[in-house]
Image (cartoon, rainbow, N blue to C red):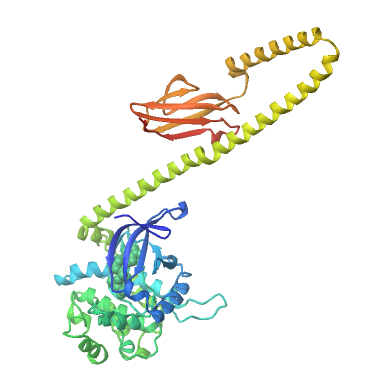
């Protein structure tokens, strides 16, 4: 698929979530952002809801200033063609949600090593975002509010990043989504205070994340398998949470304690911040024996999603190749249409002006000479002509005596014959030709039924002495 959307070209659809569609895209005209990006385009039904859009824009404004290695970077947000969007860093990988689907379906658990790695990355990202202040230093109380496994992205090269930070207040979005009856089972990761609609703070995210960790270590869902949304909400607020070390005796006791503290229903008894929990995790991690056999995320992801990895690699390569071609031909058209034509026009103007000046001088001279008789001017004219043509032939046939420069000539396709000023140069592209700087040459390229013609003026500046040309079918 290729669809132009504002400044972006949408290359392929990654997913449709509850609130938006996600596309792999590229910026159409900025080489700085030539890397792949992800566009989150809000679904049409949300775009007309003024309250939602107001919140979406306010939150995007805050989030786009957050830069941290464990948070997906937002580059741009706005509106195009009646739909709102966010342009963000593309994470070439899978969401933790997709990985969990595979594991939990078969009751498989993630190794404590991987769980620890995930925990350190996610808590680092959360701590950074939770501490966001505006430029006046005012604390913004940024809370993710939608810490579910789909919003944790894992890249095939081992990066772990949080996405959708506070983008349009989760509880509000959830009400909207459910009214639209498009999403089910998103309640499974709410904190008790979210279920009770209390004012929220950073501790809410810690509870939600701990539910994800519990499920990864248990190999089964904690709340979301319940029969109805109401039952889930009730269980989150009231049901005791089974000790993870009882559910899976392989889980180390220390990790069990940490999880228990993060899963306290009363937030006063929970960790006060991601940093506090991270401290305990790191203390435990430093006591653990290093296991050289332990799997890492890139290995697990490439094994579980081999087909996706190969397919998306191709899509990305193709996007990169087409981007390089675009860039190459952008250069060519710039040289052909802007630089060169302008140069030639200026040179022609200068030439015409100097001829006119010479003519005026000549006329004036002739007028004066008329008085002196005709023999003397004839001799002068003969000498002038001899010198002029002599100089001209020297100039044309002995170019090495003037200033010659090297001009690099390349074409698409390569191996084309090069004609200069109507004569076969004997060379084929790509090659380097010695030409006189400042002179206008007419290049002709021929290969089978493909041709191209191009005037070119070699410059003093070596970097401008490059010709890239794309041949086109000969017009009949
Ligand atoms: N920046 C990104 N790079 C790569 N893939 C992404 C990116 N953002 C989202 N995705 C993928 O798109 C999927 C859908 O994302 P989306 O945020 O629309 O829905 P969701 O995460 O399932 O639900 P929620 O509305 O709770 O965020 C994600 O699960 C993830 O696989
Ligand atoms: Mg999401």
Kindly identify the residue that appears in the image at 33 percent across and 78 percent down: 146
Closest to the observer, 17 or 98: 17
Which quadrant of the structure image shows residue 462?
A: top right
Q: Is residue 159 above or below residue 238?
A: above
Q: Is residue 338 above or below residue 473?
A: below
Instruction: Report x, y in % for residue 287.
Output: 33, 72
The answer to whether 454 appears left or right of 253 in the picture is right
In this orientation, does residue 210 appear? yes
The answer to whether 29 appears left or right of 154 in the picture is right
Which quadrant of the structure image shows residue 77?
A: bottom left
Residue found farthest to the left: 106
Residue found farthest to the right: 371
Could you tell me which quadrant the C terminus lies in? Answer: top left
Could you tell me which quadrant the N terminus lies in? Answer: bottom left
Instruction: Report x, y in % for residue 253.
Output: 25, 79
Instruction: Report x, y in % for residue 41.
Output: 35, 67
Kindly identify the residue that appears in the image at 28 percent across and 74 percent down: 18
Tally of marks: 0
Which quadrant of the structure image shows residue 173?
A: bottom left
Closest to the observer, 285 or 430: 430
Kindly identify the residue that appears in the image at 24 percent across and 92 percent down: 238
The answer to whether 232 appears left or right of 418 in the picture is left
Closest to the observer, 399 or 143: 399
In this orientation, does residue 289 appear? no
């Amino acid at each position: 698929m290729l669809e132009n959307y504002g400044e972006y070209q949408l290359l392929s659809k990654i997913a449709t979530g509850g609130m938006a569609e996600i596309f792999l895209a590229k910026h159409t005209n900025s080489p700085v952002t030539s890397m792949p990006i992800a566009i989150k385009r809000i679904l049409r039904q949300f775009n007309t809801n003024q309250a939602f859009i107001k919140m979406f824009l306010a939150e995007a404004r805050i989030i786009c200033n957050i830069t941290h290695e464990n948070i997906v970077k937002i580059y741009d947000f706005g509106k195009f063609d009646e739909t709102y969007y966010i342009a963000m860093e593309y994470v070439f990988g899978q969401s933790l949600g997709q990985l969990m689907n595979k594991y939990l379906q078969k009751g498989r658990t993630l190794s404590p090593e991987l769980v620890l790695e995930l925990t350190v990355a996610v808590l680092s990202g959360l701590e950074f975002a939770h501490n966001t202040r505006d430029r006046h230093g005012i604390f913004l109380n940024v809370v993710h509010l939608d810490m579910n496994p789909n919003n944790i992205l894992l890249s095939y090269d081992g990066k772990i990043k949080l996405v959708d930070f506070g983008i349009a207040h989760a509880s509000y979005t959830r009400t909207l989504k459910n009214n639209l009856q498009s999403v089910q089972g998103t309640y499974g990761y709410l904190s008790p205070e979210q279920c009770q609609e209390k004012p929220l703070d950073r501790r809410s995210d810690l509870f939600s994340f701990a539910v994800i960790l519990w499920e990864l270590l248990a190999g089964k869902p904690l709340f979301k398998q319940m029969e109805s949304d109401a039952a889930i909400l009730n269980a989150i607020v009231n049901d005791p949470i089974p000790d993870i070390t009882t559910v899976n005796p392989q889980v180390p006791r220390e990790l069990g304690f940490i999880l228990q503290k993060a899963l306290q229903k009363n937030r006063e008894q929970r960790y006060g911040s991601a940093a506090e929990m991270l401290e305990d995790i790191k203390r435990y991690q430093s006591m653990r024996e290093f296991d050289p056999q332990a799997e890492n995320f890139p290995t697990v992801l490439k094994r579980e999603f081999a087909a996706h990895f190969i397919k998306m690699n191709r899509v990305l390569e193709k996007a990169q190749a087409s981007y390089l071609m675009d860039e190459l031909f952008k250069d060519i058209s710039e040289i052909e249409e802007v630089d060169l034509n302008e140069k030639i026009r200026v040179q022609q103007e200068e030439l015409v002006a100097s001829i006119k000046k010479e003519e005026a001088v000549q006329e004036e001279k002739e007028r004066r000479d008329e008085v002196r008789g005709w023999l003397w001017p004839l001799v002068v004219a003969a000498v002038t002509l001899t010198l002029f043509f002599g100089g001209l032939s020297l100039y044309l046939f002995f170019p090495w005596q003037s200033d010659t420069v090297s001009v690099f000539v390349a074409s698409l396709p390569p191996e084309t014959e090069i004609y200069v000023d109507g004569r076969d140069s004997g060379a084929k592209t790509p090659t380097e030709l010695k030409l006189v700087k400042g002179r206008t040459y007419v290049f002709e390229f021929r290969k089978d039924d493909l041709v191209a013609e191009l005037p070119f003026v070699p410059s003093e500046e070596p970097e401008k002495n490059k010709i890239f040309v794309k041949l086109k079918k000969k017009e009949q």
